Image: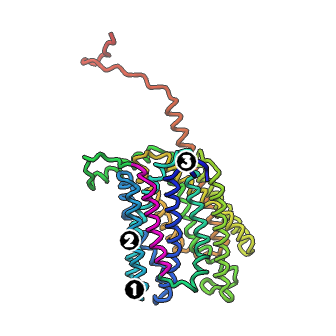
Amino acid sequence: MHPTLRRNRPFVRLWFAQIASNVGDQCYAIALVWYLLERVDSPSALSLLSIPEMIAGLLFTLLFGAIADRSSPRALMICSDLARFLLALAVFAMMLGGVDHLGLFMGVQFGIGLFVALFAPARTVAVRAVVPPELMNQANALQDTTFRAIRIAAPMAVAALSPFVPLPWLVFVNACAYALSAAFVWSAGQATPPRTTPSERMTPARYARDIVEAGRALRANRTLLFTILFGNMGFLAWQTLWTVGFPVLAADLSGGAVGSGGAEGAGGGWLGVIVGCYGAGNLLGSLFMTRLPVAKPFRAVLLGWLFLAAGYAVIAAGASTPWVVCLGAAIGGIGGPVIGIPLLTAIQTMAEPCHTGKIYSVNALSFTAFCIGSSAIGALGVGDWPPRAMFGWGAAFLVAMVAAAFASHAGTARRLRTKESAPPAPAKNPASADGAPSSNV
């Protein structure tokens, strides 16, 4: 950690809050899936669990971004943590009672998605308020590294504890983690004062105008707009390859059909190895970004997508060779933090302070929209391609996207420079009443 960040008490407390909630989230996710897998009639129905969260995000992200820009982010984060604490306790009680109705758990997932949509823009605003701009990238990289390390270590710890700890108590750990997160956020102090005057009355129309104003500001800031657009467009390829490409590749390596797991479940084992290599690349990329000051986030984001493209190209070239596949997954994994960290830094340093939460929400909506589009592409037949073709398509798409991004941004910058350097047009004398030029005397 950078010495200045280490001495930054509010940021350190926010970082501790993130650690607590991330650990709890991992325990909750694993416990919930295992519990429902033992009780629902169709394991494929578990894929429905993510839908309520996405719907909540799509419906409320922009509104919550506007609220984060108008209110105390510290208060919003505490409210979100306490609400998720109560929801986790509800799931804990349902598990203890043996409830097996999937609809009830989906309802809780909608609530969790609702408060995640409130927490994320508020945290973005809070970090911007307490971290100086020159250290923003290091702060975001530290948080990203922490998240990815926990995502690797926590499932292993849960697997080791699962024979001794009943599943409901893992959810109770999550509830306690949210309470601890709220305590850390409270101890961080007031991150930013509310941005409205006490006499201003906030109405739905006022929030709508805030959102429109943020859209206009984002449109005027072409570099930030391009960073958000192309920072998320690559997920058109990533989502399909993550959810379909890697499982198909693992089944192919094991010599079995998709869904069969190969000989003695080898497909599942290969999937774990591939995802583990990708996660190791993620962690390496995060550690790299903690020491790299990013002056041009747009170019850093495109570099991240090139890492993904290189990884996919390696996989496509050696799709039948396990060590080549693992190498390609690790190379591609480096790209994740190189994309996400500069993208968040760009929002926190390039957006106007009064629009940070809303522009973060626009970024979240863009991510969701491109992921949904990618899922549709996979459903339309890309998922039926052999792994070599799938990953080759992904690499080619990302390279073409990066080239288009560079060309679009360079063209826009050139037009702006031409406009700024053009001599001002000569002023025209207003015509006199009889149509003759008026005199300047």
Q: Is residue 280 above or below residue 1?
A: below
Q: Is residue 232 above or below residue 5?
A: below
Q: Is residue 224 above or below residue 252?
A: above
The amino acid pointed to by label 1 is: His
Pointer 2 local density, CA inside 10 Å: few below 14, some 14–19, many at least 20: some
Q: Are marks 1 and 3 in contact (CB under 8 Å)?
A: no
Residue beneath the point at 48% across and 49% down: 130
Residue occupied by mark 3: 408
Indicate the position of residue 192 as horizontal and vertical percent values.
Answer: 41, 49
Look at the image and tell me whether residue 240 can be seen: yes
Q: Disc 2 to disc 1, how far (Cα)? A: 16 Å
In the image, taking residue 396 as reference, residue 126 lies left or right, namely left
The amino acid pointed to by label 3 is: Ser
Q: Which numbered tag is attached to residue 111?
A: 2
Indicate the position of residue 424 as horizontal and vertical percent values.
Answer: 45, 26
Residue beneath the point at 67% across and 71% down: 388
First to last magenta residue range: 169-192
